[in-house]
Amino acid sequence: MEWGMANRLARTIKPDGHCFYLALDHGYFQGPTHKLENPGQTAQPLLKYVDAVFIPRGSLRSTFDPKMETPVILRVSGGNSMIGDDLSNEEVSVSIQEMLRLNASAVGISVYVGGKYEHQSIMALAKLVDTCNDYGMPVMAVTAVGREEEKKTARYLGLACRVCAEQGATVVKTYYCEDFEKVVQGCPVPVVIAGGPKTDNDLEVMQFVYDGIQRGAIGVNLGRNIWQNESPQAMACALQAIIHEDASPEAAFEIYQEIKNSSKA
Ligand code: 5RP
């Protein structure tokens, strides 16, 4: 692997081979999501627990301190919105010069396999990989399901991950699902798990992160289940213990409760 690519990857995947990304990119198509009105403010107390932030350029520039040390995975696709016709109508929305100017350690793009704009979406990934390879920039492909939640099966996600890997994605982000190991086994590049809507069961989040890693994911790219939690720092610390210290979900839950209760005291 070329030095620059290896160096960038080493910033966001730790020596244990695992990674913890904080997803803060929702505003690029959802607008001012609850608790993400100011992403920099939301992220600030969590930065010490995570290995990178996944963020679009707008809120990176306007709400993050450029002196921060946490690596940036820049969201570089867009062109759609929650109220538009079809979420899969996305393209690459950031130039390579801008990715470098913002000192991105990697970039991320959604890919809508099976969506209305499937061809455009897969070709956007392929072209982004070509451009990024010239500059040693890793590409994270996000297997996006849009509004079609029923697509979160090992069969669909396995297919989507493999398509992204074959187009040259460095890492693929997908959802945890039943038979998740089949998704990982069919994907020749590392897989990271996304979160999904906030659940009311904190232990359940820890359980699926733990199970995902046991079944072959190298880490997570999680958003709402961290920053919409009533104690985001406690959740981030607990997840860090699972991802980097091999803590069980139960041990992580104890960490969570301890921090949550001490912050109330
Ligand atoms: C939004 C994304 C998010 O990065 C991804 O879904 C993770 O966030 P969450 O855990 O809140 O689902 O790609 O487009």
Image (cartoon, rainbow, N blue to C red):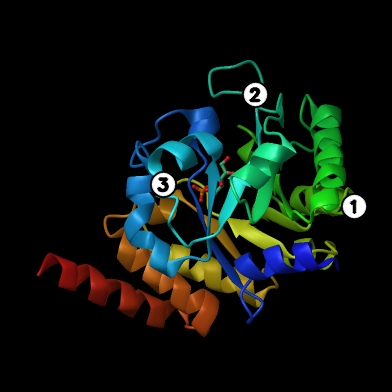
Q: In this view, does 37 lie above or below 21?
A: above
Residue 176 location (% of width, % of height): 62, 58
Mark 1 and mark 3: span between their CA atoms? 34 Å
Q: Is the C terminus in the top left, top right, bottom left or bottom right quadrant? A: bottom left
Residue 164 location (% of width, % of height): 82, 49
Tell me what residue is drawn at x 34 percent, y 49 percent: 42
In terms of secondary structure, where does tag 1 sit? Answer: helix
Query: Would you call the spot at circle 2 few (<14 residues within 10 Å), some (14-19), or many (20 or more)?
Result: some
Q: What residue type is labelled 2?
A: Gly
In terms of secondary structure, where does tag 2 sit? Answer: loop
Tell me what residue is drawn at x 85 percent, y 66 percent: 2
Q: Which residue is at the front of the view, 102 or 46?
A: 102
In the rendered structure, the answer to whether residue 224 lies left or right of residue 159 reads: left
**Which label's residue is closer to the chain start, 1 or 3?**
3
Q: Is residue 126 visible?
A: yes
In the rendered structure, find residue 166 and report the number of the disc placed on it: 1
In the rendered structure, find residue 79 and report the number of the disc placed on it: 2
**Which label's residue is closer to the chain start, 3 or 2?**
3
Q: Which residue is at the front of the view, 70 or 145?
A: 70
Q: Is the N terminus in the top left, top right, bottom left or bottom right quadrant? A: bottom right
In the rendered structure, the answer to whether residue 175 lies left or right of residue 223 reads: right
Q: Which amino acid does label 3 sit on?
A: Phe
In terms of secondary structure, where does tag 3 sit? Answer: loop
Q: What residue type is labelled 1?
A: Glu
